[in-house]
Image (spheres, coloured by chain):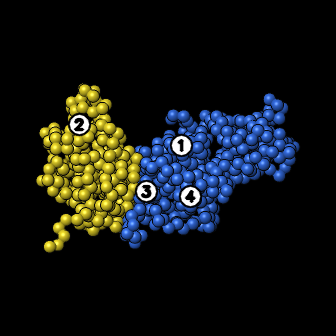
Amino acid sequence: MAKVLMKGNEAIGEAAIRAGCKNYFAYPITPQSEVAEYLVKRLPEVDGVFLQGESEVAVGYMIFGAAAAGERVMTTSSSPGISLMSEALSYIAGAQCPAVFVNIMRGGPGLGGILPSQGDYFQATKGGGHGDYHLFVFAPDGVQEAVEMTMMAFPLAEKYRGPVMILGDGMIGQMMEPVEFRDDLKVEPLNKDDWATNGMDTRKSDKRNLVRSLFLDPEVLNNNNLQLKARYEQMKKEEVQYEGYNTDADYKILIVSYGTMSRVCKTAIDEMKEEGLEIALLRPKTLFPFPEKQVFSAATKESCQAVISIEMSMGQMVEDVERCVKGQRKVHFYGECGGEIPSPEKIIEVIRGLIRGE
Amino acid sequence: MGKTFSKPEALSSTMTHYCPGCTHGIVHRLIAESIDELGIRGRTVGIAPVGCAVLAYNYFDCDFQEAAHGRAPAMATGIKRVRPDLIVFTYQGDGDLASIGMSEIIHSANRGEKFTTIFINNAIYGMTGGQMAPTTMPGQRATTAPMGRNVEETGMPIRMANLLKELVTPAYITRQAVLNPKQVNKAKKAIKKAFEYQVENKCFSFVEVISNCPTNWGLTPLDSLKWAEENLLPYYELGDYKVPE
């Protein structure tokens, strides 16, 4: 299929439909409201369901209800809205239901700002809501990847029976790029009859199904969480996605960066390369599972003197980078979070300062 | 002689955890009878609340989801929108529905979601041990209102059926009670009616049921029924508040 020029938010909406998701519930919030404005027109064309909920709290549970009934379902929001949905995310994770959440991040804490940010890394990768759970977290670096990851999210949510989050930022949601919708990424839904509350008649069974996250018996709760943990371990083995950039060179510094920020880092790396300075980038495409081994091996390459995590935050992913580097190299951090994305020039200045030992 | 009384199919055989004299069991049975009579068990999904009925899913034999506190109407919306062929009901208490879940119930009713809500109003938080609810009567004692509810500080009890009937969207809104056999029979008719409206895809249906809580009211089961008759029914008037055309 030919490429089309689309805004990130609209492309994410289209990707959901192409992935076979016909159910969308959402509440307006900048900078992602275009997803709803796109889908309210597009979903009726495919006999889909569009509903604007009364709050992000309610939307989270509309998603839970629909997911528990066995249907593919998605919502999109932005940081403050995701905080409100985090209660439902915890329940959905506990009840083991597949659902797709998109967070087009804006600055925080509080109302923060409406410009791009990566301030929700902790919230996305460490849980967000209460209790022992993780989300599967994708981090697209542009509109094409946002589309691909949205399409991959539905089968992954079903495979691991849990919520998957696409963690974008306001830049990815708002910018227009040429994008291709790859039919090969569409995967037919798994049969959910063994657990979904889709009605006994639907599955021609006289055994009822129950979807819950309440397990008063400590042993049963422990077993439920052990099941979740086993899935997270399987994700770490099978689903890690990352990109290395200039990692074949004998680089002096390894940058770890994701999403919009990583694209700026690539530009900076290209400019430094022209000046004879080799710098590499390790870009996690999945933030959970995190490319732990890949970060370690890239950081410990002989030529590499130091590692720096560059983020549109005050330093969140850097904690995972430090964990993965295991003290073998010094791990530095640079970030800005007001909504101004650091320029390639700023990155070059930071890297040169690092090399000078500042 | 044939069998004249048996357990509805939609009820499970599990022993309930409800306190002696509590009327939850009666309402469960009325729901189950209605489901059986309408022949909808195979396409029914119930939603259990947080509160005393949190384990209600153990007592019904149909698909069930368990919600967070107050969120059952949002979950019901999610199911009903993506699977309009399913019959969906929420079972909620007054802390769940009238306090933390006020937004969800109002907006679901206002959208005219085609599901059924059974709202148990016993004027107190039961499961957490007798705290004040939005429905607690003036002067009624609760663990968080030890001197009795002071309406100067906490306002008057919320009458959900009265509140919901003010929404312009068509709906079936009724308030019933299960304090004596006559009321139980009427409540049964209302609950069945509520499910019928859903089967006909007609409107949102809401049955408030004035109930008791001997344990947290500190009364014997019989005294609790009397107390409810004397104290709750004058304020929470029974009857249909809204019927769709």
Give the secondary structure at mark 3: strand
Q: Which residue is mark 1?
A: A128
Q: Which residue is mark 3?
A: A211
Front-lying residue, A259 or B98: B98
The amino acid type of the residue labelled 2 equals Gly
Asked whether the beta carbons under mark 1 and mark 3 sit within 8 Å of each other, the answer is no
The amino acid type of the residue labelled 1 equals Gly
- Colour of chain A, in one word, is blue
Residue at 28% x, 29% y is B145
Q: Earlier in the sequence, mark 1 or mark 3?
A: 1
Residue A205 appears at what percent x and percent y?
A: 40, 70
- Colour of chain B, in one word, is yellow
Q: Kindly report the distance in space between the C-alpha atoms of the residues bearing marks 3 and 4.
A: 16 Å
Mark 2 burial class by Cα count in 10 Å: few <14, some 14-19, many 20+: few
Asked whether the beta carbons under mark 4 and mark 2 sit within 8 Å of each other, the answer is no
Residue A346 appears at what percent x and percent y?
A: 73, 36
Front-lying residue, A286 or A343: A286
Q: Which residue is mark 4?
A: A160
Mark 3 burial class by Cα count in 10 Å: few <14, some 14-19, many 20+: many
Is A173 located above or below residue B147 in the figure? below
Asked whether the residues under marks 1 and 4 belong to the same chain, the reply is yes
The amino acid type of the residue labelled 4 equals Tyr
Q: Which residue is mark 2?
A: B218
Give the secondary structure at mark 1: loop
Badge 1: chain ID:
A
Badge 3: chain ID:
A
